[in-house]
Image (tube, helix red, strand yellow):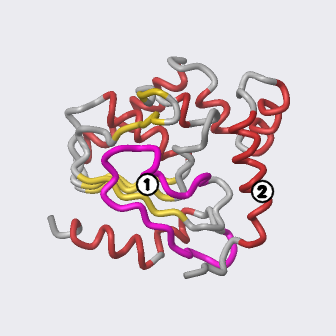
């Protein structure tokens, strides 16, 4: 089935994927490209164990520990921070980890800089579901220029459902559109009464 959404962002998604796969983030052209388009992502991932990166992970972990939610919903860069926080804190045990519009699989820029580092020998390098998360579901709009590639399951082991859904005809990456979507409602519905 062909999905109509996202045709206008195809060139941006293709350029992002090609540049990320072709160059190393440390090289000038990609570094400048990422700093302009994905400023927060570049800042967060600049150093593997920077004080700011650890502080962000700890803040997310502390809030999860305090609220003890059944569901952790993480959007965009938040999915990267939550992924790392859940790995760093196996005592946090949400029943569902839901990523929306996630750049987790973006090669070189995000995927290869995650903590813990994805394991394996190319081309079989994989990240993994945070062991404390009961179930991991990913939802991405095919027009979202940040979730490149939109499906995480070819890059991560342990994803229960990798759903590509037309979320909105415009503003593909907006959290509010993901949260209003039927795909998100169907995913979190079973956990609301738990």
Which residue lies at the image location 62% right of the left edge and 62% below the top edge?
Answer: 173
Query: Residue 100 location in percent, x, y?
Result: 48, 58
Helix, strand or loop for disc 2: helix
Which range is magenta?
147-171
Query: Residue 55 location in percent, x, y?
Result: 47, 26
Q: How many numbered marks have been drawn onto this rendered protein structure?
A: 2
Q: Is residue 160 magenta?
A: yes
Which residue lies at the image location 40% right of the left edge and 40% below the top edge?
Answer: 83
Which residue lies at the image location 63% right of the left edge and 38% below the top edge?
Answer: 41
Query: Residue 104 location in percent, x, y?
Result: 52, 44
Residue bearing mark 1: 99
Question: Toward the viewer: 123 or 26?
Answer: 123
Question: Toward the viewer: 37 or 141?
Answer: 141
Which residue lies at the image location 46% right of the left edge and 49% below the top edge?
Answer: 154
Question: Toward the viewer: 114 or 168?
Answer: 114
Mark 2 neighbour class, 10 Å CA radius: few under 14, some 14 to 19, many 20 or more: some
Q: In the image, is residue 100 above or below residue 8?
A: above
Magenta span: chief secondary structure: loop
Query: Residue 27 location in percent, x, y?
Result: 79, 23
**52 sits left or right of 119 in the view:** right
Mark 1 neighbour class, 10 Å CA radius: few under 14, some 14 to 19, many 20 or more: many
Q: Is residue 176 magenta?
A: no
**Which of the two discs, 1 and 2, labels the residue nearer the N terminus?**
2
Q: In the image, is residue 47 above or below residue 138?
A: above
**130 sits left or right of 110 in the view:** left
Q: Quadrant of the N terminus?
A: bottom right
Q: Quadrant of the C terminus?
A: bottom left
**9 sits left or right of 192 in the view:** right
Helix, strand or loop for disc 1: strand
Residue bearing mark 2: 12
């Amino acid at each position: 089935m062909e999905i109509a959404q996202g045709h206008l962002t195809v060139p941006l998604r293709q350029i992002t994927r090609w540049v990320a796969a072709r160059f190393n983030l440390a090289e000038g052209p990609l570094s400048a490209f990422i700093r302009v388009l994905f400023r927060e992502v570049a800042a967060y991932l600049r150093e593997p164990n920077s004080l700011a990166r650890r502080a962000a992970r700890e803040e997310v972990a502390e809030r999860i520990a305090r609220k003890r939610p059944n569901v952790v919903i993480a959007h965009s860069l938040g999915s990267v921070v939550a992924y790392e926080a859940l790995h760093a804190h196996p005592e946090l045990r949400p029943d569902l980890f839901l990523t929306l519009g996630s750049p987790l699989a973006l090669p070189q820029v995000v995927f290869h800089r995650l903590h813990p580092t994805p394991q394996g020998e190319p081309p079989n390098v994989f990240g993994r579901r945070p062991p404390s998360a009961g179930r991991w579901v990913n939802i991405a709009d095919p027009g979202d220029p940040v979730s490149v590639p939109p499906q995480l399951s070819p890059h991560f082991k342990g994803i229960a459902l990798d759903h590509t859904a037309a979320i909105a005809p415009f503003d593909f990456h907006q959290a509010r559109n993901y949260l209003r979507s039927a795909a998100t409602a169907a995913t979190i519905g079973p956990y609301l009464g738990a």
